[in-house]
Image (tube, rainbow, N blue to C red):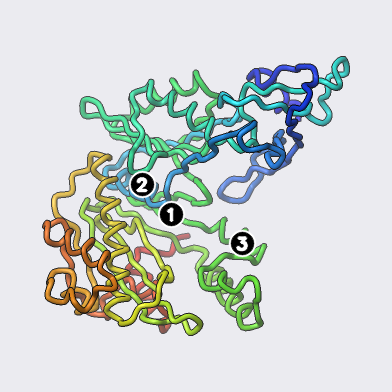
């Protein structure tokens, strides 16, 4: 607590002022947390002063609050590129990150418990810097970090605002930001060192060396390849037994014994696959190809279909989805086409991301679909009259195909990898498709 308080004072987080009449005063409290590594070992005992943001009033002591965080797909794309090119991956952590954000609003805080000034016990803390718990704190910190990175020549991505790109004279650096956790990679180690030293002079930056553990994901080297594992995350959830699964979560308010049995089955599967991880291969290309599938009217309660897709960058799986569709489909072709349209939207976003990353994609993406009707519909306007009720999806996909920016190809159900995301499967079939997703066992 004393260490945290000294950091607050050193940073000029507040000044003490006499009580102000009619002012909204925000309470605060101390929060204690154990910081652990990828093996679950305790690395730090952390005490943090947190403002009770629930006491804040909109329009008075806060306005805008949204702050972006990097998308999981963006992380996987950048990691895939780094592994493919043999680039180093550095992990950085900003200590007391939120304390660096400058506040634009006037916020009064009560003095922290245990550290009340005996000479001014009734004074209030007029905040100059953001504090953990304030509604605008993440946004203030992100704006502060963005300014520092722009001075170093980085530009924020329009595709993912938490991705920063530096491109100059053949040097490419990519920075991924998730609040105060940072991944830095690129094709120039000297430039990376310069960035780390520059940021260290501005922030209390901890250089954690090669990337090993990020957002609950363990990054393990496997020769020239890399395996992404969630072993520790799974162990924590097995301890709590509250693991969130898409289907089970639909019955959280009125669960039955059948649902509890399903949860236990999921937990047993996770326990049995602790040592499985997602493999990123060094010898991977930069072409996009995807698999899409749908289970027509598979839900017995509302007869909505479940759509799924798997998208690969070269041989590395970078994006996937298994989601119930928002509306009921009137035919299997319609449900497949809706899933196809969702996949095309993700592919379009990935193409934009790769362009910003200066990654040349020499061939158009190929989308594999196991429904002949949906495949023909994407290229043949004759079927338009049958699908007027999904006209927006029709035009969206059809335009991509007509412009030569997408190729939709038929694939047999036996070879359809996305089948694993849409329906229950026999064990042998499930394991076969799981292996094709590049999920491998590791020690």
The residues bearing labels 1 and 3 have C-alpha atoms spaced at a distance of 18 Å
Question: Which circle marks residue 228 in the picture?
Answer: 1
Q: Quadrant of residue 435?
A: bottom left
Q: Is residue 170 left or right of residue 230?
A: left
First reached walking from the N terminus: tag 1 or tag 3: 1
Which quadrant does the N terminus fall into? Answer: top right
Q: Which residue is mark 3?
A: 237
138, 18: nearer the viewer: 18
Q: Which residue is mark 2?
A: 79
- Outermost residue on the top side: it is 119
> Would you say the residues marked 1 and 3 are in contact, meaning their CB atoms lie under 8 Å apart?
no
Q: Is residue 408 left or right of residue 186?
A: left
Seen at 44% across and 81% down, the residue is: 303
| Image spot of residue 244 (x, y percent) | 57, 65
Seen at 15% across and 56% down, the residue is: 405
The residues bearing labels 1 and 2 have C-alpha atoms spaced at a distance of 10 Å
Q: Is residue 36 above or below residue 264?
A: above
| Image spot of residue 52 (x, y percent) | 71, 39
- In the structure shown, which secondary structural element does the residue marked by tag 1 occupy? strand
> Would you say the residues marked 1 and 2 are in contact, meaning their CB atoms lie under 8 Å apart?
yes
Q: Quadrant of residue 140?
A: top right
- Residue 45 visible to the viewer: no
364, 388: nearer the viewer: 388
- In the structure shown, which secondary structural element does the residue marked by tag 3 occupy? helix
| Image spot of residue 324 (x, y percent) | 43, 71
- Residue 294 visible to the viewer: yes
First reached walking from the N terminus: tag 2 or tag 3: 2
Q: Residues within 10 Å of mark 1 (few under 14, many from 20)?
A: many
The residues bearing labels 2 and 3 have C-alpha atoms spaced at a distance of 25 Å
């Amino acid at each position: 607590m004393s260490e945290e308080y000294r950091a607050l004072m050193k940073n000029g987080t507040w000044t003490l002022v006499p009580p102000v009449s009619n002012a909204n005063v925000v309470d605060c409290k101390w929060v204690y947390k154990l910081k652990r590594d990828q093996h679950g070992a305790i690395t730090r005992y952390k005490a943090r002063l947190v403002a009770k943001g629930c006491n804040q009033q909109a329009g008075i002591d806060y306005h805008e609050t949204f702050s972006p965080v990097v998308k999981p797909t963006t992380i996987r794309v950048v990691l895939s590129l780094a592994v493919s090119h043999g680039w180093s991956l550095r992990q950085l952590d900003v200590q007391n990150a939120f304390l660096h954000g400058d506040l634009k609003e006037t916020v009064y805080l009560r003095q922290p418990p245990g550290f009340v000034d005996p000479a001014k016990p009734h004074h209030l803390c007029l905040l100059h810097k953001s504090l953990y718990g304030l509604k605008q704190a993440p946004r203030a910190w992100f704006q502060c970090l963005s300014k520092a990175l722009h001075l170093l020549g980085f530009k924020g991505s329009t595709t993912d605002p938490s991705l920063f790109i530096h491109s100059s004279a053949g040097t490419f650096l990519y920075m991924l930001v998730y609040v105060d956790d940072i991944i830095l990679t690129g094709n120039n180690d000297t430039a990376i060192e310069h960035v780390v030293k520059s940021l260290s002079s501005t922030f209390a930056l901890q250089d954690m060396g090669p990337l090993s553990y990020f957002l609950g994901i363990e990054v393990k080297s496997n020769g020239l390849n890399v395996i992404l594992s969630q072993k520790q995350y799974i162990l924590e959830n097995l301890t709590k037994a509250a693991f969130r699964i898409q289907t089970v979560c639909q019955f959280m308010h009125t669960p039955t014994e059948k649902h509890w049995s399903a949860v236990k089955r999921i937990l047993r599967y996770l326990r049995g696959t602790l040592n499985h991880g997602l493999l990123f291969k060094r010898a991977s290309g930069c072409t996009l190809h995807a698999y899409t599938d749908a289970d027509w009217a598979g839900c017995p309660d509302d007869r909505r279909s479940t759509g799924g897709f798997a998208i690969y960058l070269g041989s590395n799986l970078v994006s996937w989805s298994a989601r119930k569709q928002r509306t009921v489909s009137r035919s299997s072709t319609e449900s497949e086409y809706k899933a196809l349209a969702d996949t095309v939207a993700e592919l379009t976003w990935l193409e934009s991301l790769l362009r910003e990353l200066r990654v040349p994609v020499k061939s158009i993406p190929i989308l594999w679909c196991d429904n002949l009707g949906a495949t023909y519909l994407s290229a043949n306007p004759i079927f338009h009259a049958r699908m007027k009720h999904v006209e927006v999806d029709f035009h969206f996909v059809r335009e991509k195909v007509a412009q030569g920016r997408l190729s939709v190809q038929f694939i047999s159900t036996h070879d359809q990898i996305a089948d694993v995301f849409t329906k229950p499967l026999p064990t042998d079939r499930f394991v076969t498709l799981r292996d094709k997703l590049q999920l491998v066992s590791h020690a």
